[in-house]
Image (spheres, rainbow, N blue to C red):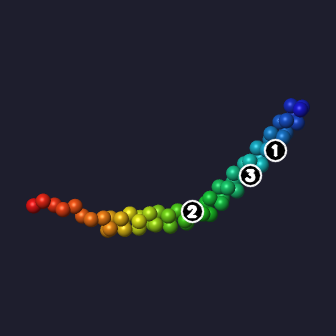
Amino acid sequence: MHPETHLALHHTRATDLRAEAAAHRLAAQARRPYAIRTRLGWTLVEVGLRLASPRPAFAH
């Protein structure tokens, strides 16, 4: 393959990959509100586990 043709194909593929990465980045930013839901959910699980576990007996 001619070097200039190879370079042109490389530039075209690189442009396509950059566009795909930008689209993926925008989609990830649109899903950000779920991160708060996930954090809140795991906090509730932690609180529930603390409430459900028995307290250690203290010696007086």
Which comes before the other along the chain, label 3 or label 2? 3
Q: Kindly identify which numbered label has been placed on residue 44.
A: none
Q: Where is residue 30 in the image (x, y as percent from the top left)?
A: 62, 63
Which comes before the other along the chain, label 2 or label 1? 1
Residue 54, compared with residue 13, is above or below; it is: below
Q: Position of residue 28 (x, y in %)?
A: 62, 59
Whole-number angstrom distance, CA of label 2 to CA of label 1: 31 Å
Q: Which residue lies furthest to the right in this view?
A: 2
Residue for point 55% across, 65% down: 34
The answer to whether residue 38 is left or right of residue 58 is right
Q: Can you identify the residue that label 2 sits on?
A: 32
Please say if the residues under marks 3 and 2 sit with CB atoms less than 8 Å apart. no
Q: Nearer the viewer, residue 24 or 55?
A: 55
Q: Is mark 1 on a helix, strand or loop?
A: helix
Q: Residue 51 occupies which quadrant of the picture?
A: bottom left
Residue 30, compared with residue 16, is above or below; it is: below
Q: Can you identify the residue that label 3 sits on?
A: 19
Q: What element carries label 3?
A: helix
Residue for point 69% across, 53% down: 22
Q: Residue 5 occupies which quadrant of the picture?
A: top right
Q: Kindly identify which numbered label has been placed on residue 12.
A: 1
Q: Position of residue 7 (x, y in %)?
A: 83, 36
